[in-house]
Image (cartoon, helix red, strand yellow):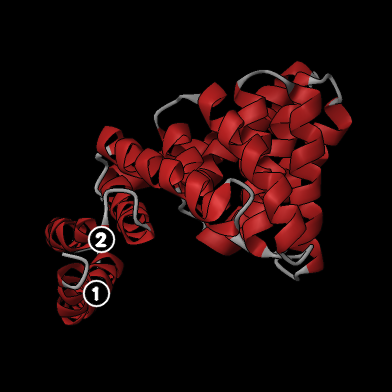
Amino acid sequence: MTRVLPMLVLAALPLLATTDEDWRALYYKGQQLAVEKSFARAESVYAEALNKAELFGKDDVRVASTEQALGETLRGDKKLSDAEAALQRAVNIYAVTPGDSSIEFAEAQFDLAGVLMDEGKYQSALQSLNLLLPIFDKNLDPRDSKLAAGLCMQGDTYRMLKRYASAETSLKRCADILTENGAIGTASFGEATNSLAIVYQRLGQTADADRYFTFAAKIREQALGIGSPELADTLEAHAALLHQMGRDAEAKQKEKMAAAIRAHSAKK
């Protein structure tokens, strides 16, 4: 009996190697389809990859990798509850192997937080972000774009929870990283400055809010175009602030510009 068991293990090794190759091929095929936004096909391929991965054990890291990729694909396909379930499984596996201080765990939490934000589950999203950001701080370059994205997401989560002072801290740090990276003209920077403007308005710092709304509008026009809905959002929010400040003529001008953008978008 003692001789038979090692022989069985040795016989299984080529089969496991082939299974790993099959899993990798399916995994990369799923990634390619997801990039092409062929979500239904990608989901089908990832389901096959998951079956292969689970042959190594239900808690194998290949299972976690597949669930994480599947979760992001499901998010792209607007299947948010399924995406959350897939990403939560990935998080649970990574929490054990390689551990809850690993970059793999943090990146899965990052993806999960994004889905939770989409679902409006802001407190749960904040819990994920508060777990992952210290790991990002420890393992990533201080100017890493993913660290900036996590901080901006944390700031927006605090903002949605009406914790405006905390939101300002996270959003300012995000904006500072983007500035250091030369990303001032990007959509991400426009989003950060727009969020900061809203936070300053809620904090009663109207001068700062006015300045950041003006900045956000310029960045969004540059990065997204004069007809972007995001620019209309900024103009409308700025108009509300200007009415609050008694600058009604300026407010009406921005409302008129926003209305023109909305009307143009509706015709498409």
Q: Can residue 247 be seen?
A: no
Q: Can residue 36 be seen?
A: yes
Q: Is 125 placed left or right of 169 in the picture?
A: left
Residue under circle 2? 56
- Indicate the quadrant containing the N terminus: top left, top right, bottom left or bottom right: bottom left
Residue 203, image quadrant: top right
Residue under circle 1? 20
Q: Is 192 placed left or right of 20 in the picture?
A: right
Disc 1 vs disc 2: Cβ atoms closer than 8 Å?
A: yes
The residue positioned 51% from the left and 44% from the top of the image is 95
Residue 170, compared with residue 145, is above or below; it is above
Inspect the image, locate mark 1, and give the three-letter code of the amino acid beneath it. Asp
Near-viewer residue (100 or 118): 100
Near-viewer residue (176 or 143): 143
Residue 199, compared with residue 139, is above or below; it is above
Measure the C-alpha gap from mark 1 to mark 2.
9 Å
Near-viewer residue (46 or 96): 96
Q: Where is residue 257 in the image (x, y as percent from the top left)?
A: 54, 41
What crowding class fits label 2: few (fewer than 14 Cα within 10 Å), some (14-19), or many (20 or more)? some
Query: Regarding mark 1 in the picture, which secondary structure is present there?
Result: helix
Residue 80, compared with residue 136, is above or below; it is above
The residue positioned 32% from the left and 46% from the top of the image is 75
Q: Where is residue 35 in the image (x, y as percent from the top left)?
A: 30, 69
Inspect the image, locate mark 2, and give the three-letter code of the amino acid beneath it. Phe
Query: Regarding mark 2 in the picture, which secondary structure is present there?
Result: helix
Q: Is 173 placed left or right of 233 in the picture?
A: right
Q: Where is residue 126 in the image (x, y as percent from the top left)?
A: 60, 30
Q: Earlier in the sequence, mark 1 or mark 2?
A: 1
Near-viewer residue (120 or 135): 135
The residue positioned 84% from the left and 19% from the top of the image is 204
The residue positioned 33% from the left and 58% from the top of the image is 69
Q: Which of marks 1 and 2 is in front?
A: 2
